[in-house]
Image: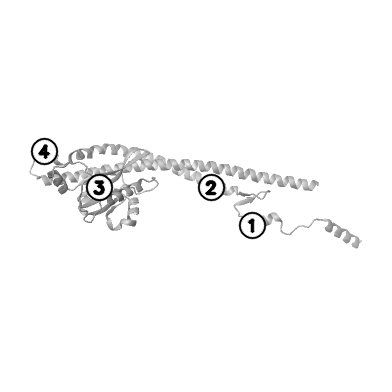
Amino acid sequence: MAMAALRREGRRLAAAPFTSPTPLNALRSSLVSPSEEIGSSGVRFISTQVVRNRMKSVKNIQKITKAMKMVAASKLRAIQTRAENSRGLWQPFTALLGDTPSVDVKKNVIITISSDKGLCGGINSTSVKTSRNIHKLNSGPEKENKYVILGEKAKAQLVRDSKKDIELIITELQKNPLNYTQVSVVADDILKNVEFDALRIVFNKFQSVVSFVPTMSTVLSPEVVERESESGGKLGDLDSYEIEGAESKSEVLQNLTEFQFSSVLFNAVLENACSEQGARMSAMDSSSRNAGEMLDRLTLTYNRTRQASITTELIEIISGASALEG
């Protein structure tokens, strides 16, 4: 009886199909990345867990960009009012002393105003590019051009190729709310440490939330102003004014040019701060929209991957059931 049972077991093993100790599906799984899945047709699908993590990251980035846009809008409203009020401070000086960007002098000092923080589009690159063009236009064998930098971003760009021409660097100017007292201290520091015939202030003039214009304002030294007024140029009308008191004409011009410089610098810093916040609003709005579009594409990819996984499982179940019935 034992021999008969052994023969029956042998016939059963012979009739059973041969199975490999390592199934083909397991071999395929070992060759595929953990973040991918293989369907019944051999097509690779990205893992749903990876897509979910990516969607979560994009949602977090979108929340941050929306918050930064609202913060920039709040700051813009506060700075815009002060910038508009400051325009009435320097305009009388422009009417009296003029703004002569084409004046030819030996010592030019280019004051480049930029921001300390990024994520505001190309506003800082525009200021640096304009400053470099002014430096190139005023270069010559007997001329001297120096930079005074206000802001961390302009410093990072100009230090690369113009380090020897940088005379003074001032950063974190906007760490506290801007006021005239703070800017006048900066202006006094520049006047004490820099020798110049003309100060050329480069900044971005605010037009609207989506628009700003690179602008240059020129402030001449008292000696150049007196020379230009005596030569009968655009500043020749100064002689028509009467000077009261014991002060001489040179002393009056000294006081006027110092006050003009601080007023123009104050307006330039505020205008550039407005342009910075407007550019940041536009940049964060574009980032939020891009994050929304990416989230839509990831959602579509997640749904397709999930549907493909379900379809693959159904096919395997039906195939298994058909094999059992057969």
Q: Which residue lies furthest to the front in this view?
A: 141
User: In the rendered structure, which disc, 1 or 4, sits on the residue that comes first in sequence?
Assistant: 1
Q: In which quarter of the image is residue 257?
A: top left
Q: In this view, does 154 lie above or below 300?
A: below
Judging by the rendered image, the residue that carries numbered circle 2 is 54
Comparing marks 1 and 4, which lies closer to the viewer? 4
Expressed as whole percent of the image width and height from the top left, the position of residue 98 reads 20, 41
Confirm or deny contact between disc 1 and disc 4 (CB under 8 A).
no
Which amino acid is tagged 2?
Arg
Judging by the rendered image, the residue that carries numbered circle 3 is 200
Q: Residue at x 60, y 47 (%)?
A: 48
- Give me the C-alpha separation between circle 3 and circle 2: 48 Å
Q: In the shown orientation, is residue 224 left or right of residue 274?
A: left
Give neighbour class at mark 4: few <14, some 14-19, many 20+ (Cα, 10 Å).
few
Judging by the rendered image, the residue that carries numbered circle 1 is 31
Q: Which residue lies furthest to the bottom in this view?
A: 3
Comparing marks 3 and 1, which lies closer to the viewer? 3
Which amino acid is tagged 3?
Arg
Confirm or deny contact between disc 1 and disc 2 (CB under 8 A).
no
Judging by the rendered image, the residue that carries numbered circle 4 is 240
User: In the rendered structure, which disc, 1 or 2, sits on the residue that comes first in sequence?
Assistant: 1
User: In the rendered structure, which disc, 3 or 4, sits on the residue that comes first in sequence?
Assistant: 3
Give neighbour class at mark 3: few <14, some 14-19, many 20+ (Cα, 10 Å).
many
Which amino acid is tagged 4?
Ser
Task: Give the secondary structure at mark 3.
Answer: strand
- Give me the C-alpha separation between circle 3 and circle 4: 27 Å
- Give me the C-alpha separation between circle 1 and circle 4: 91 Å
